[in-house]
Amino acid sequence: MRIELLPSSIPSSDAQFLVSFIVNDTVAIDAGAIGFLADLERQRAIRHVFITHEHLDHIASLAILLENVYEPGPDCIELLAAPEVLEFLHSDVFNGRVWPDFFELSSPENAFLKTTVLEPMVPVVRGGLTVTPVPVSHGVETLGLVVDDGRAAVGFPSDTGPTEHLWRHLNAMPHLKAVFLEASFPSSLSDLATLTGHLCTRTFPIEAAKLPAEVRKIIVHRKVRYAAEIAREIAALGLDNVELVRPGYGYEF
Ligand SMILES: [Zn+2]
Ligand SMILES: [Zn+2]
């Protein structure tokens, strides 16, 4: 499978303001940046958008994406998320004030969006990919996602502090190739990381060690103002199979 983290920052910077992954052109994980893509054809190719949780860096461009790709008719993007997240999107974003109520405006014959409720540990198959939601530990209800095309599996924990359930699930997958694991804060802000349900450079190596040694751990979600500091601290740890993400690069697994 092909995976890209969309760039959403200063060109050439590997730290990101917003979160959106595209998997095999048609599946998106989070909608932080995708509606801001200059390439409208890539936006139109998206059929399924998984939302891991409702934090703004993960949904910032969702309304713009749906607006950009809308065409009269039954064909529309599918949003897949936990029920609380779908309710939040309806009540707090698509509420007729922040944005038109695309939920109410959608009918089967003419739709802006359709929704599917994700249940923890219940896989769904979309675009030839089996996607399994697994709860992580982020303060607000957050579903990490495991994406499996039958030959390779990749973990997307989304935002999380120290957690267990997802690592147990991933350790049982012999064809697990990579995990896009967050490291939001430097060690000097470990208290803030704990309070906000994120990893820092102190907890990152502990979580990474819960995964098989041969699996690539690709670091995402560095807070932009600490990105260089986090990169230095991670490099000093000398961890095997740990690398910084390359936004805009097409990872093949
Ligand atoms: Zn978050
Ligand atoms: Zn985030």
Image (cartoon, helix red, strand yellow):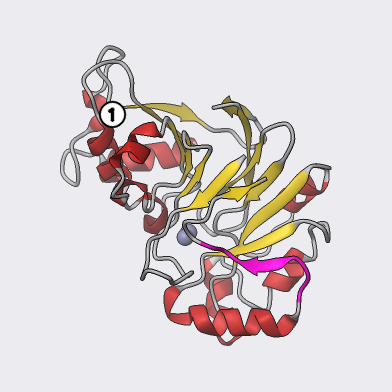
Quadrant the N terminus occupies: top right
The image shows a total of numbered marks equal to 1
Image coords of residue 67 (percent x, y): 23, 37
Q: Residue at x 45, y 47 (%)?
A: 30
Q: On the rendered structure, is 219 left or right of 93?
A: right
Asked whether 17 or 199 is in front, the reply is 17
Amino acid on which disc 1 is placed: Phe
Instruction: Classify the position of the C terminus by image quarter.
Output: top right
Label 1, on which residue?
A: 103
Task: Give the residues in magenta.
Answer: 239-246
Up-down relation of residue 192 to residue 34 (above or below): below
- Picture quadrant of residue 75: top left
Describe the element under mark 1 as helix, strand or loop.
helix
Q: Is residue 175 left or right of residue 202?
A: right
Q: Residue furthest left?
A: 97
- Is residue 238 visible from the viewing direction of this image? yes
The answer to whether residue 186 of the structure is visible from this angle is no
**Foreground of the two, 140 or 73:** 73
Mark 1 residue CB less than 8 A from any atom of ligand 1: no
